[in-house]
Image (cartoon, rainbow, N blue to C red):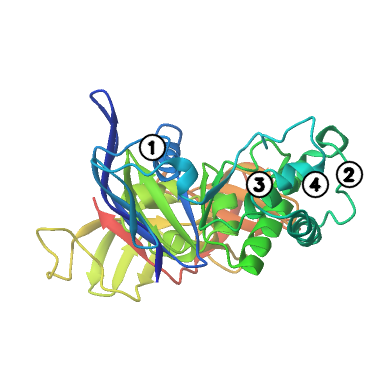
Amino acid sequence: MSRLEFDGVAHAYGKHAVVSELSFSLDDGEIGCLLGASGCGKTTVLRLIAGFETPSAGEIRLQGEVIASATRQLLPERRHIGMVFQDYALFPHLSVADNINFGMRNASADEKRRRVGELLELVGLAGQHAKYPHELSGGQQQRVALARALAPKPKLLLLDEPFSNLDVELRERLSLEVRAILKATGTTAMLVTHDQHEAFVVADAVGIMERGRIAQWATPYDLYHQPATRYVADFVGQGVFLPGEVVSRRAVRVELGVLEAKLPLACGETCVSCGRNCRIDVLLRPDDVVHDDTCSFQAEIVHKAFRGAEFLYTLRLPSGAEVLSLVPSHHNHAIGEKIGIRLDADHVVAFPQ
């Protein structure tokens, strides 16, 4: 059952359209994410859900109830929506327990005490109830902020760039922990971020936003391997486009060889059914190009980035085109050296030239 629904929602600041014809749904217990570059409209969507902005068209429904439209705007405090901010927004003069209690004003003292204990146990801060925010690390403060948002058992939890103030290692660890906590509590949540790795770690479904619209709403796996548009293919992960020629309905030839496709190739609007000789652009990810010393096809290393367990090589093909390849780090080749490569792609992603 859908917990949150957007149906043709639009919003503008003056004459500047920020969100246009936005439609998607989030099921009970599902974690969604809006992912996109700065200015794409993702934070405005969060503000529309929270009740800080009013849509100019369309409807936003929470558990089937219209909470926002051009003619109806339910007050933020009546929506039963929790929110976690990137700056934590903890009250510095209140203890951890009192911060968590803040959203449970109508609960009894016993209910508050029990709920605080449950949540501190859940977020890994058992016994820290008497401490103050300045006595906690950034990661601990974010856990307290999450516990405070979960305390009143909201219908929906919003997370606005919740890990952006943390260092990379802590951000990755906390992303996994937050997902586990949300799943353990059965909380329906919507995350907003510009960090692809964070989105893919936390969310069940991700919407790639482009100029106020969702270009594709799908699982992280499908976004990476089956992007619906060239924009999504370009935005998600790393990769390059190589020109290709369709040799059959399920095969395309690129400079490195012939790729067999599991799905029919879309040659283009004017020749979808022709099956041969169409020119298309084929997306190759770094894991599609394999270093193999036994291969006669060679490419020149023009750049290398050490990533610990592997190198990300930028390779120049004989035509001058460049591709990326992930190679185990014990294959430490020099820039300017030529190495053998071959294709190993399970998913063929192609778009008309």
Mark nearer the viewer, 4 or 1: 4
Mark nearer the viewer, 3 or 1: 3
Mark pair 4, 1: CA separation: 35 Å
Q: Are marks 4 and 2 in contact (CB under 8 Å)?
A: yes
Q: Position of residue 244 (x, y in %)?
A: 30, 58
Q: Is residue 322 visible?
A: no
Left or right: 302 as drawn, with respect to 317: right
Q: Position of residue 278 (x, y in %)?
A: 18, 61
Judging by the rendered image, the residue that carries numbered circle 2 is 130
How crowded pointer 3 is (Cα within 10 Å; few <14, some 14-19, many 20+) is rated as few
Q: Report helix, strand or loop for mark 3.
A: loop
Mark pair 2, 1: CA separation: 39 Å
| Upstream in sequence: badge 4 or badge 2 | 4
Q: Nearer the viewer, residue 224 or 285?
A: 224
Q: Amino acid at mark 2?
A: Ala
**Mark number, residue 97:** 4
| Upstream in sequence: badge 2 or badge 1 | 1
| Upstream in sequence: badge 4 or badge 3 | 4
Mark pair 3, 1: CA separation: 33 Å
Judging by the rendered image, the residue that carries numbered circle 3 is 105
Judging by the rendered image, the residue that carries numbered circle 1 is 41
Q: Report helix, strand or loop for mark 2.
A: loop
Q: Amino acid at mark 4?
A: Ala
Whether residue 56 is situated above or below residue 301 in the rendered picture? above
Q: Amino acid at mark 3?
A: Arg
Whether residue 347 is situated above or below residue 315 in the rendered picture? below
Mark pair 2, 3: CA separation: 19 Å
Q: Position of residue 288 (x, y in %)?
A: 50, 63
Left or right: 39 as drawn, with respect to 244: right
